[in-house]
Image (spheres, rainbow, N blue to C red):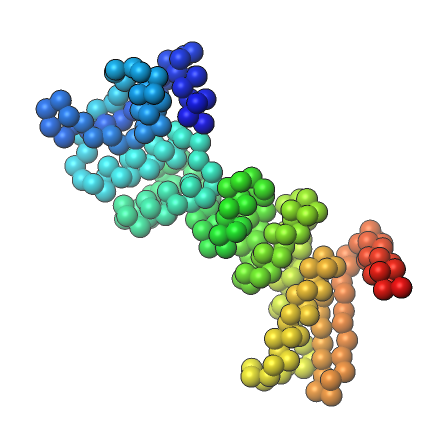
Amino acid sequence: ALEELKKSILQNGLIQPITVRRVEQNKYELISGERRLRAIKDIGYKTIPAYIIVVESKEAMLALALIENIQREKLNQIEVAHAYKRLIDECNLSQEQVSEKVGKDRTTITNTIRLLKLPLEIQNSLIKDEISAGHARALINLYDENLQLQILSKIKKNNLSVRKVEELVKHITEGKRTKNEYKPASNDPDLISQKDIENKLRIIFGTKVICKQKKDGAGQITIDFYSNDELDRLFELFDIIEKSNS
């Protein structure tokens, strides 16, 4: 990215000046434009166009730097999320104030910051463009980290669209809200295994699966489908499973 910036400066000049503040006579502190300054130094230029502004506090200076970086630099979604969070935590801005300063609606600010709640493996996949921000936002709605990582693997392996992931997450979350006929006590070890079975089957079949177990150990497994195409897909999957066991 820095090499591309240097080529652009050599061809077109520096389009956007850096921003600084005067700290004493002939001495300035950089507020924003670190990459531009590095590129200019690497090229060998002795001067650089700059905006000189008056900033009264460190918080205000940090806010200006973060806002300009968000608007000017090519940041990935995780970097943007961290910048929004710093504006809130370190500059004492509300989400509404952040939205006004960066020109984004408040929902966008909220959803972007929520990306930081995802496991680091998912955040790194987003940074590397292995998944999109849409995929990541869909995974946020799952509060089970193991499930999130399982679906991440499924996205990469099967190249799932954002819509497919949203549907899969919806089936899983709706299934969790379904009441079972039998509810073991909280200290019953079967509670964990039953949930694990449901979660694994939902991942395998790509749809809502409900496991109901009675006190005598008997029960039933219900697999939902929502169209003829989904039913055909399930039959194909059953055929694959049957052949693998024969």
Residue 131 seen by the camera: yes
Question: For the view shown, which residue lies furthest in the left direction?
Answer: 25
Q: Position of residue 103 (x, y in %)?
A: 40, 35
Residue shown at the point (14%, 30%) measured from the top left: 23
Picture layout, residue 124 above or below residue 190 = above
Picture layout, residue 5 above or below residue 63 = above
Relative to the observer, which residue lies in front, 140 or 131? Answer: 131
The quadrant of the picture occupied by the N terminus is: top left
Picture layout, residue 105 above or below residue 209 = above
Residue shown at the point (47%, 38%) measured from the top left: 76
Asked if residue 176 lies left or right of residue 67, the reply is: right
Question: For the view shown, which residue lies furthest in the bottom direction?
Answer: 216
Residue shown at the point (25%, 22%) measured from the top left: 51
Q: Position of residue 232 (x, y in %)?
A: 85, 54
Q: Position of residue 67 (x, y in %)?
A: 34, 36
| Image quadrant in which you'd find residue 104 | top left
Residue 238 seen by the camera: no
Asked if residue 100 lies left or right of residue 92, the reply is: right
Residue shown at the point (45%, 44%) measured from the top left: 78
The quadrant of the picture occupied by the C terminus is: bottom right
Q: Position of residue 52 (x, y in %)?
A: 21, 24
Asked if residue 52 lies left or right of residue 169, the reply is: left
Number of numbered tags placed on the structure image: 0
